[in-house]
Image (cartoon, grey):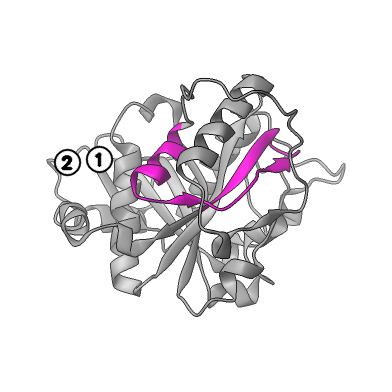
Amino acid sequence: MTLTNQALDQSAKQPKEKKFSVFLVNDEPTKRNCFKLRYDIFANEMGANLPFDLDSLNQDGLNQGGLDQDRFDAHSQHLAVFDNNTNEIVATTRLLSTADSQHTNGFYSETEFDLSNIITKPFQFTEVGRTCIHPDYRCSSALPMLWQGIARYIVENKIDYLFGCASIPFSNGDKYLRSVMHHLRARHFSSPEFRVHPHIPVRLEEMTPHADDAILPTLLKAYLRQGAVICGEPYWDAAFGVADVFVLLNCKQITDKYLNHFINRI
């Protein structure tokens, strides 16, 4: 996903001794590169049945654009991490604020969960979604770099809460999902006033609790390390073939020391 000239101008302001840079994308060609990376990960790698932008259809109704794009993207901020050595985008996520969600008839998470207990509260919210990392960079610092960009966004926009959907794959079987949910219920569930309800619940057979030895998905683990909570039972995401849990992060949980650690390195 090679950067455009405008994006390269932004990256030129970043310290070049660093392997990665992170910034909010401002130009449409670079946004399309983010959408292309998302499509490569979600559709080609994960096999998700993605919605598509009508402009990318050919006369036979097939998606020829290879882009993961939906109605939320035009009103979202898109955060990108790129490799300073190759000038390619290697990770991306999108950020949708409370104000901008008025133009999209709500948040993406509302398509999966009833958020009445969340969004009616008098706080500034931002939804984090469509996060993905190129497979060659998943053992690198690309994910921490995304969090650097998110931390800067939190401070500059005075955000009270981040939220989003984190996926648990079914590919490892029902036993794995039960193990993860057992761990989340025991250690990371929210208080009742922040609970949400999935529109399509995942039905799990009742079983005797087993050892709390679940290996959590990387993105979910990253949320929990920042102090996030899980706000209830999972949603069955048929398009992606995963169970989604709703994750809520009080930005005050990210301490001043932690924010300074991030921002001093951006």
Image: 171 above or below 195: above
Please indicate, yes or no, whether residue 223 appears anywhere in the rendered image.
yes
Q: Are marks 2 and 1 in contact (CB under 8 Å)?
A: yes
Q: Which of marks 2 and 1 is nearer the N terminus?
A: 2
Q: What element carries label 1?
A: loop
Residue 56 in percent (x, y) is at 72, 49
Which quadrant, please, contains the N terminus? top left
Residue 140 in percent (x, y) is at 30, 30
On screen, residue 220 versus residue 100, left or right, reads: left
Residue extent of the magenta highlight: 218-247
Residue 151 in percent (x, y) is at 30, 58
| Mark sitting on residue 100 | none
Q: Is residue 244 magenta?
A: yes
Image: 232 above or below 207: below
Q: Does the magenta stretch include residue 255?
A: no
Q: Which amino acid does label 1 sit on?
A: Asn
Residues at marks 2 and 1, CA–CA distance in whole angstroms: 7 Å
Q: Which of the pair 185/129 is nearer the observer?
A: 185
Q: What residue type is labelled 2?
A: Lys
User: Where is mark 2, residue-wise?
Assistant: 18
| Mark sitting on residue 84 | 1
